[in-house]
Image (tube, rainbow, N blue to C red):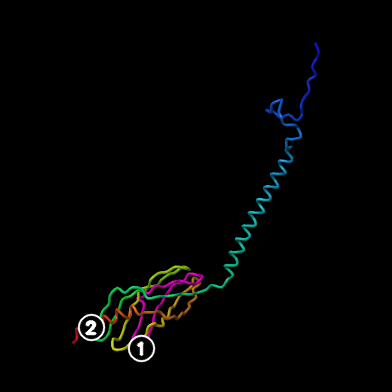
Amino acid sequence: MAREHGFIDLDQRKGDPAGSDESPGERMPSRQRVALYLVGTFALGVALGGVGVAKFQERREQQAQPATVAVNAMAGPTSGGTGRDGNAEVDAQLTVVNAGSIPVMVRLVEAQETGVMVRDTGQSLLLIPGSTDGIDVRLMVDCRMASPSPLPMRFSVQTPDQQAAELTMTVEVSAWRERADALCNASSATTE
């Protein structure tokens, strides 16, 4: 009986079938796999780090920009009023928009021209950048005088760092004036 010489295949892994089609040169050695894994991990880290640095720089640039206080306003709806003794008072709402880059607290709204006066009702209004809200005001009109429209209004706003800013802008108040004129006409009709 001829003795078969057995040999040990050093490239064969545990669990691989003995007659595998894969030649020893086609399998990736474990050192190469580890190196490929490390290179991939490094590339991923560089990509994520680049994104993180870009976000950090963007945030720093935004913080470095000077804070801008800008408020826009327009006449809102009226909700009532009275007319007597040649005067009309109209309850109205002023729509205020924070067009600046920081939050502001609107502390005061007022306007005064010949024959017309606007005052807020004492409430404050907090507006974050880009937000819009209404503040209650009272329009007082001398019915015997023509009042201007648009009307220059003064706003006092406060920033988060407790700095106060005074802003003046003209606001078209013709809708409010129409309501005041109706109250003036009703008042004059009852006094005749």
Q: Name the image quarter holding the N terminus.
A: top right
Residue 116 part of the magenta segment: yes
Q: Which residue is drawn at 59% across and 70% down?
A: 64
Q: Name the image quarter holding the C terminus.
A: bottom left
- Marks 1 and 2, how far apart in space? 20 Å
From which residue to which does the magenta span run?
A: 94-122
Residues packed near mark 2 inside 10 Å, few (<14), some (14 to 19) or many (20 plus): some
Position of 134 relative to 84 (above/below): above
- Front residue of 16/82: it is 16
Q: Is residue 58 left or right of residue 166?
A: right
Q: Which residue is drawn at 71% across and 25% down?
A: 19
Mark sitting on residue 187: 2
Q: Position of residue 121 (x, y in %)?
A: 34, 76
Q: In which quarter of the image is residue 35?
A: top right
The residue that disc 1 covers is: 114
- Front residue of 98/174: it is 174
Of marks 1 and 2, which one's residue comes earlier in the chain?
A: 1
Q: Which residue is drawn at 31% across and 88% down?
A: 145
Count of marks, rendered view: 2
Residue 148 part of the magenta segment: no
What amino acid type is highlighted by mark number 1?
Answer: Thr
Mark sitting on residue 88: none
**Residue positioned most to the top:** 1
Q: Is residue 53 left or right of residue 128?
A: right
Q: Position of residue 16 (x, y in %)?
A: 69, 28
Most frequent secondary structure within the magenta stretch: strand
